[in-house]
Image (spheres, rainbow, N blue to C red):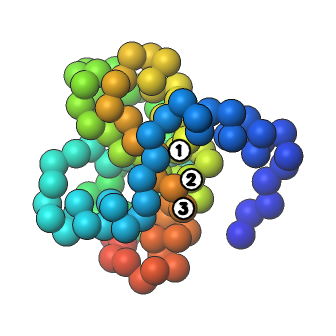
């Protein structure tokens, strides 16, 4: 597991009070039920290439704010974000909300917990 610096963890804690989060189990149930929502992996492209959640699209933390309006022009669309552990996705969710997106959720636990649970991945 990655070791995160105290200031980074402080930053993530500060935004978590402003965003919606869900669990890995929530998203697994929703994918299994074939619910309609947009699922974005905000990890680096190299991480995405090694494996990702079924149906996820790559839109890395480094570019999501730049590209989201082209990819998702509807600010009311439901968007679920995930990363390795739920930290980068929390930061990205906060930024998207600041940009006017009203239905953004960060998946706590991220790909790491998804993988630990043995849930299906795509490569």
Q: Which of 46 and 29 lies nearest the eye of the viewer? A: 29
Q: Assess disc 1: are there few (<14), some (14-19) or many (≥20) residues with their C-alpha within 10 Å of its C-alpha.
A: many
Cβ atoms at labels 2 and 3 below 8 Å apart:
yes
* Residue labelled with disc 3: 109
- Position of residue 118 relative to residue 23, above or below, is below
* Residue 117 drawn at (x, y percent): 46, 80
Question: What SS does tag 3 mark?
Answer: loop
Q: What element carries label 2?
A: loop
Q: Give the Cα separation between the discs numbered 3 and 1.
A: 10 Å
Instruction: Identify the residue position indicated by label 2 in the image.
Output: 86
Measured as percent of width and height from the top left, residue 113 is found at 52, 70
Mark number, residue 89: 1
Q: For this rendering, which residue is in front, 20 or 119?
A: 20
Q: In which quarter of the image is the N terminus?
A: bottom right
> Residue 16: which quarter of the image?
top right
26 sits to left or right of 82:
left
């Amino acid at each position: 597991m990655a070791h995160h610096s105290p200031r980074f963890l402080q930053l993530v804690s500060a935004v978590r009070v402003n965003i919606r989060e869900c669990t890995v189990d929530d998203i697994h149930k929703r994918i299994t039920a074939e619910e309609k929502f947009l699922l974005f992996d905000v990890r680096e492209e190299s991480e995405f290439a090694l494996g990702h959640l079924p149906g996820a699209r790559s839109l890395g933390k480094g570019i999501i704010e730049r590209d989201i309006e082209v990819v998702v022009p509807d600010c009311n669309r439901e968007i679920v974000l995930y990363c390795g552990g739920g930290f980068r996705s929390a930061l990205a969710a906060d930024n998207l909300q600041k940009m006017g997106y009203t239905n953004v959720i960060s998946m706590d636990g991220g790909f790491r917990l998804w993988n630990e649970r043995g849930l299906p991945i795509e490569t």
